[in-house]
Image: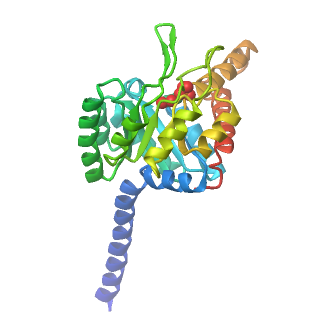
Amino acid sequence: LRSRGLGDVYKRQTEDCEKIITQAIKGGTSMLVTAEEMLKKAKAGKYAVGQFNINNLEWTKAILATAQELQSPVILGVSEGAGKYMTGFGTVAAMVKAMIEEMNITVPVALHLDHGTYEGCYKCIKAGFSSIMFDGSHLPIEENIEKTKELVAVCKGMGMSLEAEVGSIGGEEDGVVGMGECADPEECKKIADLGVTMLAAGIGNIHGVYPANWKGLSFETLAAVSEKVGDMPLVLHGGTGIPADMIKKAISLGVSKINVNTECQLSFAAATREYIEAGKDQKGKGFDPRKLLAPGAEAIKATVKEKMELFGSVGKA
Ligand code: 13P
Protein backbone atom coordinates (compact mmCIF):
# COMPACT_ATOMS: atom_id res chain seq x y z
CA LEU A 1 0.00 0.00 0.00
CA ARG A 2 2.75 2.31 1.06
CA SER A 3 4.72 1.71 -2.07
CA ARG A 4 1.60 2.21 -4.17
CA GLY A 5 0.98 5.53 -2.43
CA LEU A 6 4.51 6.67 -3.14
CA GLY A 7 4.14 5.43 -6.67
CA ASP A 8 1.07 7.64 -7.12
CA VAL A 9 2.91 10.63 -5.71
CA TYR A 10 5.84 9.92 -8.03
CA LYS A 11 3.48 9.52 -10.99
CA ARG A 12 1.73 12.80 -10.15
CA GLN A 13 5.02 14.61 -9.77
CA THR A 14 6.28 13.22 -13.05
CA GLU A 15 3.08 14.31 -14.77
CA ASP A 16 3.41 17.79 -13.23
CA CYS A 17 7.03 18.01 -14.39
CA GLU A 18 6.06 16.90 -17.88
CA LYS A 19 3.36 19.58 -17.99
CA ILE A 20 5.82 22.25 -16.90
CA ILE A 21 8.44 21.12 -19.41
CA THR A 22 5.89 20.90 -22.24
CA GLN A 23 4.63 24.36 -21.39
CA ALA A 24 8.17 25.72 -21.26
CA ILE A 25 8.99 24.21 -24.64
CA LYS A 26 5.72 25.41 -26.11
CA GLY A 27 6.22 28.80 -24.55
CA GLY A 28 9.73 28.93 -25.93
CA THR A 29 8.51 28.60 -29.46
CA SER A 30 5.06 30.10 -29.31
CA MET A 31 5.70 33.21 -27.22
CA LEU A 32 6.63 35.02 -30.39
CA VAL A 33 4.67 34.64 -33.58
CA THR A 34 5.64 35.53 -37.11
CA ALA A 35 4.02 38.51 -38.79
CA GLU A 36 2.43 36.31 -41.46
CA GLU A 37 -0.90 35.39 -39.93
CA MET A 38 -1.53 38.75 -38.30
CA LEU A 39 -0.87 40.56 -41.58
CA LYS A 40 -2.97 38.19 -43.67
CA LYS A 41 -5.85 38.84 -41.29
CA ALA A 42 -5.18 42.58 -41.39
CA LYS A 43 -5.14 42.66 -45.18
CA ALA A 44 -8.39 40.70 -45.37
CA GLY A 45 -9.99 42.80 -42.62
CA LYS A 46 -8.81 46.15 -44.06
CA TYR A 47 -6.82 47.34 -41.08
CA ALA A 48 -3.10 47.57 -40.33
CA VAL A 49 -0.87 46.20 -37.58
CA GLY A 50 1.58 48.69 -36.09
CA GLN A 51 5.29 48.04 -35.95
CA PHE A 52 6.63 50.04 -33.04
CA ASN A 53 10.39 50.23 -32.70
CA ILE A 54 11.95 49.46 -29.34
CA ASN A 55 15.06 50.99 -27.82
CA ASN A 56 15.15 49.66 -24.28
CA LEU A 57 13.16 47.98 -21.53
CA GLU A 58 10.80 50.91 -20.93
CA TRP A 59 9.87 51.09 -24.61
CA THR A 60 9.21 47.36 -24.84
CA LYS A 61 7.19 47.24 -21.63
CA ALA A 62 5.04 50.23 -22.63
CA ILE A 63 4.27 48.86 -26.10
CA LEU A 64 3.49 45.34 -24.87
CA ALA A 65 1.22 46.66 -22.09
CA THR A 66 -0.71 48.81 -24.57
CA ALA A 67 -1.13 45.98 -27.07
CA GLN A 68 -2.44 43.73 -24.31
CA GLU A 69 -4.78 46.38 -22.94
CA LEU A 70 -6.21 47.08 -26.39
CA GLN A 71 -6.17 43.42 -27.45
CA SER A 72 -4.20 44.32 -30.54
CA PRO A 73 -1.58 42.27 -32.36
CA VAL A 74 1.77 44.05 -32.40
CA ILE A 75 5.15 43.95 -34.13
CA LEU A 76 8.19 45.07 -32.15
CA GLY A 77 10.74 46.54 -34.55
CA VAL A 78 14.45 46.54 -33.78
CA SER A 79 16.88 48.48 -35.95
CA GLU A 80 20.47 47.34 -36.16
CA GLY A 81 21.50 50.44 -34.20
CA ALA A 82 18.96 49.76 -31.44
CA GLY A 83 20.06 46.13 -31.32
CA LYS A 84 23.65 47.22 -30.84
CA TYR A 85 22.59 49.75 -28.19
CA MET A 86 20.85 46.98 -26.23
CA THR A 87 24.15 44.98 -26.38
CA GLY A 88 23.05 42.66 -29.18
CA PHE A 89 20.07 40.89 -30.72
CA GLY A 90 20.40 37.98 -28.29
CA THR A 91 19.73 40.34 -25.37
CA VAL A 92 16.74 41.80 -27.18
CA ALA A 93 15.18 38.40 -27.97
CA ALA A 94 15.72 37.15 -24.40
CA MET A 95 14.25 40.33 -22.92
CA VAL A 96 11.19 40.35 -25.16
CA LYS A 97 10.45 36.66 -24.63
CA ALA A 98 10.85 36.93 -20.85
CA MET A 99 8.72 40.06 -20.74
CA ILE A 100 5.89 38.41 -22.67
CA GLU A 101 5.87 35.65 -20.08
CA GLU A 102 6.30 37.81 -16.97
CA MET A 103 3.64 40.29 -18.11
CA ASN A 104 1.24 37.51 -19.18
CA ILE A 105 0.95 38.93 -22.67
CA THR A 106 -1.49 36.85 -24.68
CA VAL A 107 -1.89 38.97 -27.83
CA PRO A 108 0.21 38.01 -30.89
CA VAL A 109 3.67 39.59 -30.74
CA ALA A 110 6.25 39.41 -33.54
CA LEU A 111 9.87 40.42 -32.94
CA HIS A 112 11.14 41.89 -36.18
CA LEU A 113 14.46 43.20 -37.47
CA ASP A 114 13.93 46.62 -39.07
CA HIS A 115 15.96 47.51 -42.21
CA GLY A 116 18.30 44.59 -41.82
CA THR A 117 21.54 44.18 -43.69
CA TYR A 118 22.29 40.72 -45.05
CA GLU A 119 24.58 40.02 -42.05
CA GLY A 120 22.09 41.51 -39.58
CA CYS A 121 19.39 39.16 -40.89
CA TYR A 122 21.48 36.12 -40.05
CA LYS A 123 22.29 37.50 -36.60
CA CYS A 124 18.56 37.85 -35.85
CA ILE A 125 17.76 34.41 -37.22
CA LYS A 126 20.36 33.03 -34.80
CA ALA A 127 19.11 35.19 -31.92
CA GLY A 128 15.55 33.81 -32.16
CA PHE A 129 13.64 36.68 -33.75
CA SER A 130 10.35 35.62 -35.36
CA SER A 131 10.59 38.02 -38.31
CA ILE A 132 13.19 39.96 -40.29
CA MET A 133 13.35 42.67 -42.88
CA PHE A 134 16.04 42.49 -45.51
CA ASP A 135 16.54 45.95 -46.92
CA GLY A 136 18.17 45.47 -50.27
CA SER A 137 16.55 48.60 -51.71
CA HIS A 138 19.91 50.33 -52.20
CA LEU A 139 21.32 47.37 -54.15
CA PRO A 140 20.94 46.79 -57.88
CA ILE A 141 17.60 44.98 -58.33
CA GLU A 142 19.32 41.73 -59.43
CA GLU A 143 21.34 41.60 -56.20
CA ASN A 144 18.28 42.51 -54.12
CA ILE A 145 16.46 39.60 -55.81
CA GLU A 146 19.33 37.13 -55.25
CA LYS A 147 19.75 37.89 -51.56
CA THR A 148 16.01 38.10 -50.90
CA LYS A 149 15.56 34.74 -52.63
CA GLU A 150 18.14 33.13 -50.37
CA LEU A 151 16.53 34.62 -47.25
CA VAL A 152 13.05 33.48 -48.36
CA ALA A 153 14.31 29.89 -48.30
CA VAL A 154 16.05 30.31 -44.94
CA CYS A 155 13.02 31.97 -43.33
CA LYS A 156 10.68 29.29 -44.68
CA GLY A 157 12.91 26.66 -43.11
CA MET A 158 13.02 28.52 -39.79
CA GLY A 159 9.30 29.32 -39.72
CA MET A 160 9.95 33.07 -39.81
CA SER A 161 8.40 35.93 -41.73
CA LEU A 162 10.40 38.10 -44.13
CA GLU A 163 9.90 41.67 -45.30
CA ALA A 164 11.61 42.95 -48.42
CA GLU A 165 11.96 46.51 -49.71
CA VAL A 166 11.82 48.04 -53.15
CA GLY A 167 12.38 51.76 -53.70
CA SER A 168 14.22 53.30 -50.80
CA ILE A 169 12.38 55.23 -48.12
CA GLY A 170 13.62 58.79 -47.73
CA GLY A 171 14.82 60.29 -44.50
CA GLU A 172 17.35 62.48 -42.81
CA GLU A 173 20.97 61.69 -43.36
CA ASP A 174 23.63 64.14 -42.24
CA GLY A 175 21.04 66.86 -41.89
CA VAL A 176 19.72 66.46 -45.42
CA VAL A 177 16.18 65.16 -45.80
CA GLY A 178 15.97 62.89 -48.85
CA MET A 179 12.56 62.67 -50.50
CA GLY A 180 11.19 59.14 -50.59
CA GLU A 181 11.52 57.24 -53.83
CA CYS A 182 8.54 55.74 -55.59
CA ALA A 183 9.01 52.03 -56.23
CA ASP A 184 8.70 50.50 -59.68
CA PRO A 185 5.58 48.26 -59.55
CA GLU A 186 7.24 45.73 -61.90
CA GLU A 187 10.21 45.39 -59.54
CA CYS A 188 7.78 45.02 -56.62
CA LYS A 189 6.12 42.12 -58.40
CA LYS A 190 9.49 40.45 -59.03
CA ILE A 191 10.36 40.61 -55.32
CA ALA A 192 6.84 39.66 -54.16
CA ASP A 193 6.90 36.60 -56.43
CA LEU A 194 9.97 35.29 -54.58
CA GLY A 195 7.66 34.39 -51.71
CA VAL A 196 8.38 37.11 -49.15
CA THR A 197 5.75 37.58 -46.44
CA MET A 198 5.34 41.34 -46.83
CA LEU A 199 6.67 44.09 -49.03
CA ALA A 200 7.75 47.63 -48.24
CA ALA A 201 7.39 49.73 -51.35
CA GLY A 202 8.56 53.33 -51.41
CA ILE A 203 5.57 55.61 -52.12
CA GLY A 204 7.11 58.96 -51.24
CA ASN A 205 7.24 58.15 -47.53
CA ILE A 206 10.09 59.36 -45.34
CA HIS A 207 11.53 58.32 -41.99
CA GLY A 208 11.43 60.94 -39.26
CA VAL A 209 9.48 64.17 -39.22
CA TYR A 210 8.05 65.16 -42.63
CA PRO A 211 9.45 68.42 -44.01
CA ALA A 212 7.06 71.30 -44.69
CA ASN A 213 7.48 70.84 -48.47
CA TRP A 214 6.60 67.13 -48.42
CA LYS A 215 4.29 66.26 -51.29
CA GLY A 216 2.40 63.51 -49.48
CA LEU A 217 2.11 59.80 -50.28
CA SER A 218 1.89 58.74 -53.90
CA PHE A 219 -1.39 56.83 -53.97
CA GLU A 220 -0.92 56.35 -57.69
CA THR A 221 2.23 54.32 -56.99
CA LEU A 222 0.55 52.46 -54.12
CA ALA A 223 -2.46 51.51 -56.28
CA ALA A 224 -0.17 50.31 -59.09
CA VAL A 225 1.97 48.25 -56.70
CA SER A 226 -1.12 46.82 -55.01
CA GLU A 227 -2.55 45.73 -58.33
CA LYS A 228 0.69 43.94 -59.23
CA VAL A 229 1.24 42.11 -55.94
CA GLY A 230 -2.34 41.01 -55.20
CA ASP A 231 -2.76 39.60 -51.70
CA MET A 232 0.74 40.44 -50.50
CA PRO A 233 0.54 42.65 -47.37
CA LEU A 234 2.20 46.01 -48.04
CA VAL A 235 4.27 47.89 -45.46
CA LEU A 236 4.24 51.63 -44.94
CA HIS A 237 7.44 52.93 -43.35
CA GLY A 238 7.82 56.38 -41.88
CA GLY A 239 4.48 56.27 -40.03
CA THR A 240 5.37 59.31 -37.90
CA GLY A 241 3.33 62.35 -38.85
CA ILE A 242 1.39 60.93 -41.80
CA PRO A 243 -2.06 62.55 -41.62
CA ALA A 244 -4.92 60.26 -40.55
CA ASP A 245 -6.76 60.50 -43.88
CA MET A 246 -3.65 59.39 -45.80
CA ILE A 247 -3.18 56.47 -43.39
CA LYS A 248 -6.78 55.37 -43.95
CA LYS A 249 -6.46 55.65 -47.72
CA ALA A 250 -3.18 53.69 -47.66
CA ILE A 251 -4.88 50.91 -45.67
CA SER A 252 -7.75 50.84 -48.15
CA LEU A 253 -5.16 50.35 -50.94
CA GLY A 254 -3.49 47.32 -49.35
CA VAL A 255 -1.17 48.57 -46.59
CA SER A 256 -1.41 46.19 -43.63
CA LYS A 257 1.71 47.04 -41.61
CA ILE A 258 2.67 50.56 -40.58
CA ASN A 259 6.00 51.38 -38.92
CA VAL A 260 6.24 54.02 -36.22
CA ASN A 261 9.43 55.02 -34.47
CA THR A 262 10.14 58.76 -34.26
CA GLU A 263 6.71 59.62 -32.85
CA CYS A 264 7.30 57.49 -29.72
CA GLN A 265 10.73 59.08 -29.32
CA LEU A 266 9.24 62.56 -29.56
CA SER A 267 6.47 61.87 -27.05
CA PHE A 268 8.93 60.21 -24.64
CA ALA A 269 11.30 63.18 -24.88
CA ALA A 270 8.54 65.78 -24.43
CA ALA A 271 7.11 64.09 -21.31
CA THR A 272 10.59 63.65 -19.80
CA ARG A 273 11.42 67.28 -20.51
CA GLU A 274 8.21 68.40 -18.84
CA TYR A 275 9.01 66.32 -15.73
CA ILE A 276 12.49 67.77 -15.43
CA GLU A 277 11.49 71.33 -16.28
CA ALA A 278 8.86 71.14 -13.53
CA GLY A 279 11.72 70.26 -11.16
CA LYS A 280 10.07 66.94 -10.26
CA ASP A 281 13.38 65.09 -10.34
CA GLN A 282 14.54 67.31 -7.49
CA LYS A 283 11.56 66.66 -5.25
CA GLY A 284 11.68 63.69 -2.88
CA LYS A 285 12.95 60.64 -4.71
CA GLY A 286 11.94 62.03 -8.09
CA PHE A 287 15.40 61.23 -9.40
CA ASP A 288 14.73 57.49 -9.07
CA PRO A 289 14.83 56.21 -12.66
CA ARG A 290 11.57 54.36 -12.10
CA LYS A 291 9.97 57.74 -11.43
CA LEU A 292 12.01 59.80 -13.85
CA LEU A 293 11.22 57.53 -16.80
CA ALA A 294 7.57 56.94 -15.91
CA PRO A 295 6.02 59.99 -17.67
CA GLY A 296 7.95 59.13 -20.85
CA ALA A 297 6.71 55.55 -20.72
CA GLU A 298 3.13 56.74 -20.23
CA ALA A 299 3.57 59.06 -23.22
CA ILE A 300 4.72 56.13 -25.38
CA LYS A 301 1.62 54.21 -24.29
CA ALA A 302 -0.61 57.12 -25.35
CA THR A 303 1.09 57.37 -28.75
CA VAL A 304 0.85 53.62 -29.37
CA LYS A 305 -2.83 53.64 -28.34
CA GLU A 306 -3.59 56.50 -30.71
CA LYS A 307 -1.88 54.67 -33.59
CA MET A 308 -3.53 51.32 -32.88
CA GLU A 309 -6.92 53.04 -32.89
CA LEU A 310 -6.11 54.83 -36.14
CA PHE A 311 -4.77 51.66 -37.80
CA GLY A 312 -7.88 49.72 -36.73
CA SER A 313 -6.03 46.88 -34.96
CA VAL A 314 -7.76 47.31 -31.58
CA GLY A 315 -9.62 44.14 -30.57
CA LYS A 316 -8.07 42.18 -33.47
CA ALA A 317 -5.77 39.97 -31.34
P1 13P B 1 9.35 56.89 -38.38
O1 13P B 1 10.52 57.00 -37.48
O2 13P B 1 9.25 57.99 -39.34
O3 13P B 1 8.08 56.68 -37.61
O4 13P B 1 9.58 55.59 -39.27
C1 13P B 1 9.70 54.34 -38.66
C2 13P B 1 10.06 53.29 -39.64
O5 13P B 1 9.64 53.31 -40.77
C3 13P B 1 10.92 52.21 -39.18
O6 13P B 1 11.28 51.38 -40.22
Task: Say which quarter of the image contains residue 210.
Answer: top right
Task: Say which quarter of the image contains residue 162.
Answer: top left
- Residue at 50% across, 32% down: 54
* Residue 198 or residue 53, whichever sits in front: 198
**In this rendering, would 307 be left or right of 135?**
right
**In this rendering, would 3 be left or right of 32?**
left
Extreme residue in the top direction: 175
Q: Is residue 115 visible?
A: yes
- Residue at 39% across, 37% down: 186
Q: Is residue 286 visible?
A: no
* Residue 114 or residue 202, whichever sits in front: 202
**Count of all numbered marks drawn on residues in the image:** 0
* Residue 219 or residue 148, whichever sits in front: 219
Q: Is residue 311 above or below residue 83?
A: below
Location of the N terminus (image quadrant): bottom left
Q: Is residue 273 above or below residue 165?
A: above
Extreme residue in the right direction: 278
Extreme residue in the bottom direction: 1
Q: Position of residue 103 (x, y in %)?
A: 54, 49
The figure's colour scheme reads rainbow
Location of the C terminus (image quadrant): bottom right
- Residue at 46% across, 7% down: 174
Q: Is residue 178 above or below residue 98?
A: above
Q: Position of residue 71 (x, y in %)?
A: 62, 53
- Residue at 29% across, 32% down: 144
Q: Position of residue 184 (x, y in %)?
A: 42, 32
Q: Position of residue 179 (x, y in %)?
A: 52, 17
